[in-house]
Amino acid sequence: MANTPQARKRIRRNERRADINGNRISRIRTFVKRVESAIEGGDKAAATDALRAAQPELDRGVAKGVLHRNAASRKLSRLTKRISAL
């Protein structure tokens, strides 16, 4: 258990940050799922619109440090490739 006031404060802060980061990751996953469901439905226009909405979310996740930039780039690339194949 934490013995110093600073260590106790870090525990509190880490719990708050974990909640915030979890919400960010969940939001990103939701946007990606919307793109994937549009792709599965075969609707190219809806998939393109969903991808346009998902791209800033992925970029924001990279900027906030919850997602590696190569992972975000890879996700965008793969989704774009799947949409263009429709």
Image (spheres, grey):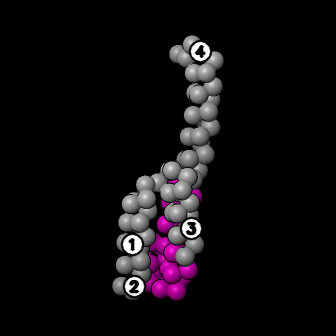
Q: Which residue is mark 2?
A: 84
Q: Which residue is mark 3?
A: 56
Q: Which residue is mark 1?
A: 77
Q: Nearer the viewer, mark 1 or mark 2?
A: 1
Magenta stretch contains residue 33: yes
Q: Residues within 10 Å of mark 3 (few under 14, many from 20)?
A: few
Q: CA distance from mark 1 to mark 2?
A: 11 Å
Q: Residues within 10 Å of mark 1 (few under 14, many from 20)?
A: few
Q: Nearer the viewer, mark 2 or mark 3?
A: 3
Q: Which residues are magenta?
A: 25-51
Query: In this rendering, is residue 36 above or below 58?
Result: below
Q: CA distance from mark 2 to mark 3?
A: 19 Å
Is label 2 in a helix, a strand or a loop?
A: helix
Is label 1 in a helix, a strand or a loop?
A: helix
Residue 4 got which mark?
A: 4
Which circle's residue, 4 or 3, is located before the other in the chain? 4
Which circle's residue, 3 or 1, is located before the other in the chain? 3
Q: Residues within 10 Å of mark 4 (few under 14, many from 20)?
A: few
